[in-house]
Amino acid sequence: MQCIANPSPPPSAVASKIFLTGGTGFFGRSILSCLRRGLLPPGTEFVILSRTPEKFLAAYPEFAGLPGVRHIAGDVRNFSFPEEEFDAVIHAATPAVTTLAPGEMRSIVVEGTRRAAGFAHFCGAKKLLLTSSGAVYGIQPPELANIPEDHPCRPVTEYGIAKLEAEKICADSGVPALIARCFAFAGPYLDRNIHFAFGNFLRDALAGQPIVIRGDGTPLRSYLYADDLVTWLFRILERGTPGRPVNVGSPEAVSIAELAETIRKVLRTPGKVVLMEKPVPGRLPARYVPSVERAKNELGLAVTTSLADAIRLSAARKQDAP
């Protein structure tokens, strides 16, 4: 897969040896993709924790044998601490599905963070980066175009509540903790068969099938491309202020219906967009769109990939059907 025409500059050298949890999820795969294509600082080393490294590498052979990358097996909640020193810990282990047993989501997020933060302290890491979530804010007021980091956090989902608790665990860890509050993303390694609208729409469009929207298509979201995501995370790790959260996402709102139509047009597929419900006249749409002024003004970050380019680049990688 070719990179975007005007890619983000590679992050500066922030750490030579990184312990990464969640290295086999979307964030981890996107980081490894950037590493493989030379978009991370030369000489960066990773030790990646996952439950079944062999299964991951069999599914993603392009990541097998990457120089400076080792995989170790373990559950993020109780893994054995490697007897090594690390410059940084990136904790990105988060359940990708919502169909977990009661309490399992909270257990993975909270107990996993507690274990990862404990390891960051144990291994002498200089920094700990948590990939938190915009879900910590709770329901975004529909009249608020872009939600900033100083908005009160009133999470309403088990996931959002757990992520807010995870932020507090990191803040109390004794290790300088950076918080990235992540929103919605696009990329070739986004799973197309779970609850992500972008991935679902891409899957159906590529199959030439109608894109069916279960609701009225009015909710507003925004999508940051994977390469930008990785650049933002490493810039936060390098230059962020411990304890000062930074939103990670695109500030450009697009409705779910507009997203579906854009995907259909960009990919030139025959399937139509089908709305299962009609919009209610006069009702403000639900929003989940970040303000990124802090990222822009304090860290010099910007969105470099358009939605159309993100669609084309995401579609370039073939994925198996479920």
Image (tube, rainbow, N blue to C red):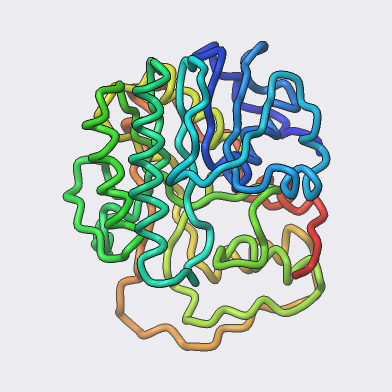
Residue depicted at 68% across the width and 27% down the height: 70
Query: Is residue 196 placed above or below 121 in the rendered structure?
Result: below
Q: Nearer the viewer, residue 274 or 97?
A: 97
Counting from the top left corner in percent of width and height, residue 156 is at 26, 65
- Quadrant that contains the C terminus: bottom right
Q: In this image, 202 relative to 74: left or right?
A: right
> Quadrant of the rendered structure where residue 238 is?
top left
Q: Nearer the viewer, residue 174 or 151?
A: 174
Residue depicted at 30% across the width and 21% down the height: 176
Counting from the top left corner in percent of width and height, residue 10 is at 61, 19
- Quadrant that contains the N terminus: top right
Q: In this image, 301 relative to 160: left or right?
A: right
Query: Is residue 261 placed above or below 292 in the rendered structure?
Result: below
> Quadrant of the rendered structure where residue 162 is?
bottom left
Residue depicted at 72% across the width and 63% down the height: 265
The number of numbered badges drawn on the structure is 0
Q: Nearer the viewer, residue 320 or 291?
A: 320
Counting from the top left corner in percent of width and height, residue 21 is at 52, 38
Q: In this image, 148 relative to 236: left or right?
A: left
Residue found farthest to the left:
152
Counting from the top left corner in percent of width and height, residue 25 is at 60, 47
Query: Is residue 17 placed above or below 53 in the rendered structure?
Result: above
Residue depicted at 57% across the width and 66% down the height: 197
Residue found farthest to the bottom:
277
Query: Is residue 260 placed above or below 68 in the rendered structure?
Result: below
Q: In this image, 18 relative to 123: left or right?
A: right
